């Protein structure tokens, strides 16, 4: 009996050291939008959804100043600072368009190139009834995953955010679990 107690104590101590030694990895969420209010709304909504679904995340507004060029995140010095802060993945969110027929691109783009893009679309457009969001994930400056989330039956900006909050957790569980 003493041996079992000693073995249990030893295993529990070792497992607690392993848990303490592990770094929690976080995902930096970047909304690629020209308007600061749209960028803020998307980043906060996505960060909240990621965190609620077990993916610790941080909005880019906590890392770079408002109005700063997000392409600085591709610099090696900034990447090392992000790693020190426990951020090892970057998720970029943008509007792909207002149609339901978009396909996921096969072209692999670098982090610097993706961050250098400008957005020509807004979260909501007056005559649109659907919007397609593109999610691109990078780890160690390499693209690891890309997906499109289509939100239909929208009537204003708030309904778009509401649709994202409803559809994204289901999409994450179904398609993103392996990444």
Image (cartoon, grey):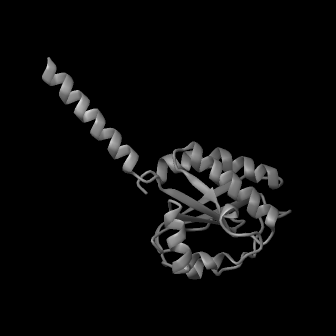
Q: Quadrant of residue 13?
A: top left
- The residue closer to the viewer here, 156 or 62, is 62
- Which residue is depicted at the point 50% across and 59% down? 86
> Which residue is most to the right?
126
Judging depth in this view, the residue of 91 and 156 nearest the camera is 91
Q: Position of residue 6 (x, y in %)?
A: 19, 27
Residue drawn at x 77%, y 57% is 129
Q: Which residue is rendered at x = 59% and y = 75% of the image?
A: 73
Image vertical order of residue 79 relative to residue 176, above or below: below
Q: Quadrant of residue 119?
A: bottom right
Q: Position of residue 69 (x, y in %)?
A: 70, 78
The answer to whether residue 69 shows anywhere in this view is: yes
Is the residue 174 above or below the residue 108 in the image?
A: above
How many numbered tags mark residues here? 0
Can see residue 146? Answer: no
Camera-side residue of 3 and 114: 3
Q: Where is the N terminus found, in terms of image quarters?
A: top left
Residue 176 vs residue 77, the one in the foreground:
77
Residue 103 position within the rendered picture, expressed as x and y whole percent measured from the top left = 56, 68
- On-image quarter of the C terminus: bottom left
Point out residue 79 in the picture as x, y percentages from the top left corner: 52, 73
In this rendering, position of residue 13 left or right of residue 142 = left
| Residue found 25% across the figure and 29% down from its top | 9
Please tell me in which quadrant of the rendered image residue 23 appears. Answer: bottom left
């Amino acid at each position: 009996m003493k041996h079992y107690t000693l073995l249990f104590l030893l295993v529990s101590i070792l497992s607690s050291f392993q848990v303490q030694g592990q770094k929690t990895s976080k995902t930096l969420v970047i909304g690629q939008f020209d308007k600061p209010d749209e960028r803020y709304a998307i980043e906060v909504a996505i960060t909240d959804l990621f965190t609620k679904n077990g993916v610790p995340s941080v909005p880019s507004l906590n890392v770079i100043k408002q109005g700063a060029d997000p392409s600085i995140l591709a610099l090696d010095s900034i990447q090392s600072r992000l790693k020190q802060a426990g951020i090892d993945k970057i998720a970029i969110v943008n509007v792909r368009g207002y149609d339901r027929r978009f396909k996921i691109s096969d072209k692999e783009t670098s982090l610097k190139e993706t961050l250098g893009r400008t957005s020509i679309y807004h979260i909501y457009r007056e005559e649109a009834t659907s919007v397609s969001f593109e999610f691109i994930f990078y780890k160690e400056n390499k693209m690891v995953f890309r997906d499109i989330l289509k939100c239909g039956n929208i009537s204003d900006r708030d309904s778009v955010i509401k649709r994202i909050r409803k559809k994204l957790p289901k999409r994450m569980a179904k398609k993103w679990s392996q990444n």
